[in-house]
Amino acid sequence: MIDRYLLRLRRDFDGEVLTRDHAAYDPARRPVGSAGAARRPLVVLRCRSVRDVVAAVAFARDTGIALAVRSGGHCFAGRSSTDGVLIDVSGLHGVDLSADGTATVGAGVRLGQLYGALHARGQTLPAGCGATVGIAGLVLGGGIGLLGRRHGPTCDRLVAATIVLADGSVVDCDEHREPDLFWALHGAGGGQLGVVTSLRLATITEPMTARVALTCPDADPARVVASWQASAPDAPDDISTSLELAREPGRPVRATVSGVAVDAARAGGWLHDLAREAGAGAQLFVADPVPFTVAKRALADPCQDVGDGRLRSEYFARPMPAGAVTELIALLGGGDARHRRRLTFTAMGGAYNRVAPEATAFVHRRERYLLEHVGHRSDSWVDASWALAHRHSSHRVYPNFPDPLLDRPAEAYWGTNHARLAAVKRSYDPQHLFGFPQSL
């Protein structure tokens, strides 16, 4: 019976229909990281048009086979992989920038391509750092990045979207057309309500930015954390930094602060204060200002750092107590670690928190920072470290960093917005065609 449906699908499909015997199947099915890498879809549907997406959704609906949607393949929980129908929208990769600064972007566009296209026109977006991350997944889950403290999450730039729903209808939505659906696309997460095929995003003039860094090779990491978490979320909006505590095999824990600043002079003053608090030979670096896209290229890609590892994370609405920080660092540096471990604190505040939690589906508008625990998939330290920090967190989790081990995922991802999101889900996907563990 499946062969009959596949034969009919091929007649209406402009893209590629890759079954398990196809030469291109194996590279096409693989996600970027290890999550979901063992999954073997029945078929990979590489869409090149909205019509292809409609046909792909109909195929999954008519056959009753589970589906997953992929734009970039970076999902830490493996949600963009499946043993059923994999709808790959990477062929929808157009970027069109209008005179008013609004970019119409295909759902298959990756951040590296998008930044490059916008840079050529003197524009950019407050978005993430991974060059191969899909813009659709980033926007639909919120979107945090180096310009977020100044301009808010990427989803706040979304002004319209086109989406293929479970019944095959193609809907254009904005604040006036299908407003509940449009609200939900601002942070509910990818693959929840349909297959987004394009997004209209309000770009910003690309600023000149300076890379900043503070290395603390001999400083007490606990002292650096105390200083950073007390001041970074309240720093001027033009300064966005992360604090990384890294433990390499056979080496002690090292603390490094890095980020970008639109106003290098103000950043330098804040960093000097932080360096003085850190003490013990902290070394400050402020680069010459360059266009944001150029500065961003020089920073490490966090997606590559995860690789075959695991990531667990949570938001924090208040500073972590000193005793907990000391325990966290001792755990990071303890044991016989054979692989790299890191804790990354990313400052929120600023424009992230100037929008009411209920204004968009992205509810995380009152947080001070995000803490990531990243280690090798075989290292039990990740879970132990997360559990230690969890006692002091806000128990909220960034939707683009999904965690399969959460006890109360709805509360963690969507908080007080969950009830409204669940109602939108019932309205637009009543048969739950777009479903996966922890979905709406």
Image (cartoon, rainbow, N blue to C red):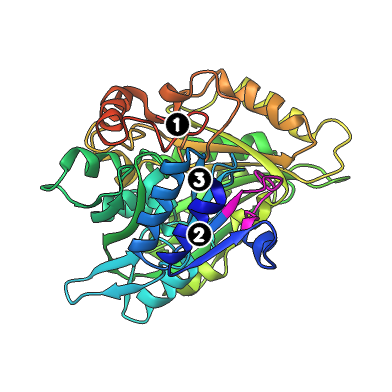
Horizontal side of residue 161 vs 327, given as left or right: left
Horizontal side of residue 278 vs 369, given as left or right: right
Above or below: residue 346 compared with residue 212: above
Horizontal side of residue 195 vs 381, given as left or right: left
Question: Crowdedness of circle 3 by 10 Å Cα count: few (<14), some, many (20+)?
Answer: many
Residue on which the image places disc 1: 439
Above or below: residue 286 compared with residue 360: below
Q: Is residue 221 visible?
A: yes
Residue on which the image places disc 2: 7
Point out the frontmost of discs 2 and 3: 2
Quadrant assignment for the C terminus: top left
Closer to us: 296 or 8: 8
Alpha-carbon span between mark 1 and mark 3: 12 Å
Question: Secondary structure under badge 1?
Answer: loop
Question: Crowdedness of circle 2 by 10 Å Cα count: few (<14), some, many (20+)?
Answer: few
Horizontal side of residue 177 vs 374, given as left or right: left
Residue on which the image places disc 3: 68
Residue 430: in magenta span: no
Magenta span: 29-43
**Mark 2: amino acid:** Leu
Above or below: residue 424 compared with residue 79: above
**Mark 3: amino acid:** Ala
**In terms of sequence position, does the residue under pointer 2 or pointer 1 come before the other?**
2
Above or below: residue 75 compared with residue 362: below
Please identify the dominant SS of the magenta region: loop
Image quadrant assignment for residue 105: bottom left
